[in-house]
Image (cartoon, rainbow, N blue to C red):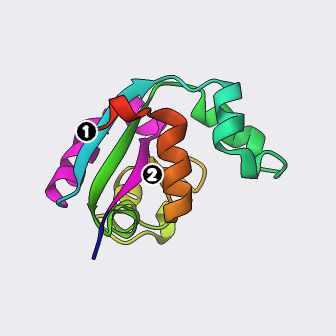
Amino acid sequence: MAVERTFAIAKPDSVKNGHLGEIITAIEQSGLKIVGLKMTQLTPAICKGFYHEHVTKGFYKELEDFMTEGPVAIMVLEGENAILRWRELMGATNPEKADAGTLRKRFGANIGRNATHGSDAPESAKFEVSYFFNAFEQM
């Protein structure tokens, strides 16, 4: 297996509800390494660029409203098979269908407010990491 990087977000609900520390701990305990981390406040313009493939979909406005309602923690994670490992740690998009112990099961309220985000493929990871982090902001 090759070492790869993936992108992660602790969404506004996680930050607001005080779960950021637990999310970071879960990442570290899983063996993934955090090589980039910062807090930020997303704007509608940032959301439109980041979620460009969803802008025309019916759920986009709700997504944008949620993602801009408070600060988020954005991260670059690194490790062998990092994309799959982070997605397994997060759990299913819908917290009701997520496995026990996953972050979305523990901290997500519903499919729209599901606590975390992660890249789903190497191509999206490359785009998402570079959207928020320049080369000097990653170890």
Quarter of the image for residue 98 reads bottom left
Element on which disc 1 rests? loop
Whether residue 61 is visible here, answered yes or no, is yes
Q: Which amino acid, by three-letter code, is at mark 1? A: Met
Residue 116 spot, x, y in % from top left: 44, 49
Residue 65 spot, x, y in % from top left: 67, 32
Per the rendering, the mark at residue 139 is 1
Q: In terms of depth relative to the viewer, which is nearer, 23 or 39?
A: 39
Q: In terms of depth relative to the viewer, which is nearer, 71 or 2?
A: 2
Magenta span has 26? yes
Q: Which amino acid, by three-letter code, is at mark 2? A: Gly
> Would you place residue 100 above or below residue 130 in this image?
below
Instruction: Give, as a single range, the part of the protein colored magenta.
Output: 4-30
From the viewer's perspective, tell me whether residue 63 is left or right of residue 69: right
> Would you place residue 26 above or below residue 10 in this image?
below
Q: Quadrant of the N terminus?
A: bottom left
Per the rendering, the mark at residue 53 is none
Residue 88 spot, x, y in % from top left: 36, 69
Q: In terms of depth relative to the viewer, which is nearer, 30 or 94?
A: 30
Q: Which residue is mark 2?
A: 108
Among numbered discs 2 and 1, the one appearing first in the sequence: 2
> Residue at 28% of width from left, 54% of height from top?
78
From the viewer's perspective, tell me whether residue 46 is left or right of residue 135: right
Mark nearest the camera among 2 and 1 is 1
Whether residue 93 is visible here, answered yes or no, is no
